[in-house]
Image (spheres, helix red, strand yellow):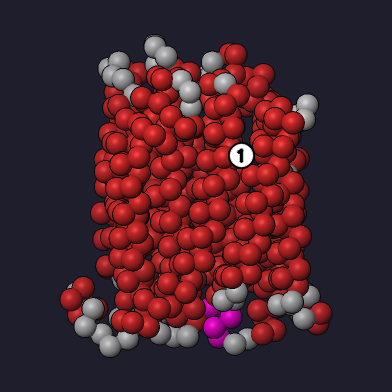
């Protein structure tokens, strides 16, 4: 089956409509995430370049602790989207109850570990010494709110799997407004100072967690509040490869941070520029994540309905829609890159390096969108292992070694890191496309070959 045939199908409009119905709210949710992140980096930059640099590193640690929540949610979406479309309300209720219980326990455990372990981790890693005392309290506050963020992420997955993504959208709108308002209030009007960046996140995710638990409770009848071990095992089976791939991705981000820290000149400014560039880049990256999540739900629902051929075509349609949006956003970012960077930092070196980062990395955004969105389709089908291998190959066999070679061994400037990131995006896109078009991800899930 080729692309021309796919677009000749009479039900192509249904694919677009169904994809957009999930993707549009998810894109708005990602916009809210973007606004939160861009506000954080803006406020950090207004305080000092040191706070802006340490925030970038601490948020990478925080994302490492979020990995388990994302892994559980990946398994949850794959399982619950199929149960929802199959019409088995009893098993659906048990699955929702079970995953919320497991997620809450995991959030509590990793929150405690985060509070205990992050000081030692920050003191151990090779970042400028003057940044370490600033990072420890910030990281511990983020860790204290981890349990609420775990529940928020997982219940968002439950809601979109049950075609109630608009409820999730309403919750995240409130989280966004709460976070941004508290950010300015706590940082500039209270003794909390820069710690207010983390406090605002913890308080806002608590509010979102409470709202989502209320929405989710309506999906679980009292008689279905039973822990289903079999369902949890299936969620873990699907989720652990995704969790490992996320761990490797976040560790690679920290590795890049440490490689850039070894630059002989202006390392703090480069780190601040890296943090700034990533936040601006997320304007293009987050819509790709939105379509990734939408693809997971769509594929899971269609497989639950035994519509295997439609699942294959819908995944391609969703990917093409997402890539088109990402290309438009990338072009806009390139047009306003210097202005955006200057808004987020007053330091001319940070502005210049962040602008260069954006000019180079926007070239790789279409490839990033391709592999990220197709990965959503694979995860919705439960084929998370191939995604894990592709991410591992493109980051730890290509990106990190080459960045180390260029910067630490050969003494190149930060630009070499930015170009290497593009190379790994292209490799990941080609590997993911090959896996998807081979359709083994459908066969692996017990579906007869298309």
Q: Nearer the viewer, residue 115 or 228?
A: 115
Picture layout, residue 40 above or below residue 318: above
Picture layout, residue 116 above or below residue 380: above
Q: Nearer the viewer, residue 220 or 251?
A: 220
Badge 1 marks a residue whose secondary structure is helix
Whether residue 161 is visible: yes
The image quadrant that residue 281 belongs to is: top left
Q: Is residue 84 magenta?
A: yes
**Residue 162 drawn at (x, y percent):** 59, 76
Q: Is residue 358 left or right of residue 95?
A: left
Residue farthest toward the right in the current orientation of the protein: 222
**Residue 323 drawn at (x, y percent):** 32, 59
Q: Nearer the viewer, residue 373 or 357?
A: 357
Residue shown at 47%/74% (left/top)?
21
**Residue 428 drawn at (x, y percent):** 31, 50
Residue assigned mark 1: 62
**Residue 12 drawn at (x, y percent):** 31, 81
- Provide the residue span drawn in magenta: 82-86
Residue shown at 30%/15% (left/top)?
411
Q: Is residue 153 left or right of residue 436?
A: right
Q: Quadrant of the C terminus?
A: bottom left
Q: Is residue 419 magenta?
A: no
The image quadrant that residue 57 belongs to is: top right
Q: Is residue 83 left or right of residue 446?
A: right
Residue shown at 64%/44% (left/top)?
180
Q: Residues within 10 Å of mark 1 (few under 14, many from 20)?
A: some
Residue farthest toward the top in the current orientation of the protein: 264
């Amino acid at each position: 089956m080729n692309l021309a045939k796919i677009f000749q199908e009479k039900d192509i409009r249904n694919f677009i409509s169904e994809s957009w119905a999930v993707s549009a709210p998810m894109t708005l949710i990602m916009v809210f995430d973007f606004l939160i992140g861009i506000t954080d980096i803006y406020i950090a930059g207004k305080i000092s370049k040191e706070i802006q640099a340490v925030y970038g590193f601490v948020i990478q640690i925080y994302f490492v602790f979020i990995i388990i929540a994302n892994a559980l949610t990946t398994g949850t979406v794959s399982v619950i989207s199929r149960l929802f479309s199959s019409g088995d309300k009893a098993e659906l209720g048990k699955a929702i109850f079970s995953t919320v219980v497991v997620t809450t326990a995991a959030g509590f455990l990793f929150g405690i570990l985060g509070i205990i372990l992050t000081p030692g981790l920050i003191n151990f890693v090779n970042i400028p010494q003057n940044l370490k005392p600033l990072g420890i309290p910030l990281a511990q506050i983020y860790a204290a709110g981890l349990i609420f963020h775990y529940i928020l992420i997982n219940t968002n997955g439950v809601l979109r799997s049950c075609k109630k993504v608009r409820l999730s959208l309403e919750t995240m709108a409130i989280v966004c407004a709460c976070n941004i308002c508290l950010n300015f209030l706590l940082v500039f009007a209270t003794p909390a100072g820069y710690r207010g960046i983390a406090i605002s996140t913890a308080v806002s995710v608590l509010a979102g967690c409470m709202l989502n638990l209320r929405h989710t409770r309506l999906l679980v009848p009292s008689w279905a509040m039973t822990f289903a071990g079999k369902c949890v095992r299936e969620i873990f089976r699907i989720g652990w490869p995704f969790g490992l791939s996320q761990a490797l991705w976040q560790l690679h981000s920290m590795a890049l941070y440490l490689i850039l820290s070894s630059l002989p000149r202006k390392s703090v400014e480069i780190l601040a520029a890296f943090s700034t560039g990533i936040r601006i880049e997320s304007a293009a990256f987050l819509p790709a994540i939105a379509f990734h999540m939408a693809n997971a739900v769509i594929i899971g629902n269609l497989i639950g309905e035994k519509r295997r051929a439609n699942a294959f075509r819908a995944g391609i349609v969703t990917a093409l829609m997402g890539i088109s949006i990402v290309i438009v956003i990338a072009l806009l970012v390139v047009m306003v890159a210097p202005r955006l960077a200057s808004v987020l930092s007053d330091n001319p070196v940070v502005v210049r390096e962040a602008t260069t980062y954006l000019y180079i990395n926007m070239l790789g955004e279409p490839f990033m969108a391709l592999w990220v969105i197709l990965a959503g389709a694979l995860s919705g089908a439960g084929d998370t292992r191939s995604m894990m291998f592709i991410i591992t190959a493109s980051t730890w066999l290509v990106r990190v070694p080459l960045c180390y070679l260029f910067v630490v061994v050969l003494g190149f400037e930060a630009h070499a890191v930015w170009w290497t990131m593009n190379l790994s995006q292209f490799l990941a896109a080609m590997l993911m496309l090959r896996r998807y078009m081979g359709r083994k991800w459908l066969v692996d899930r017990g579906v007869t070959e298309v």
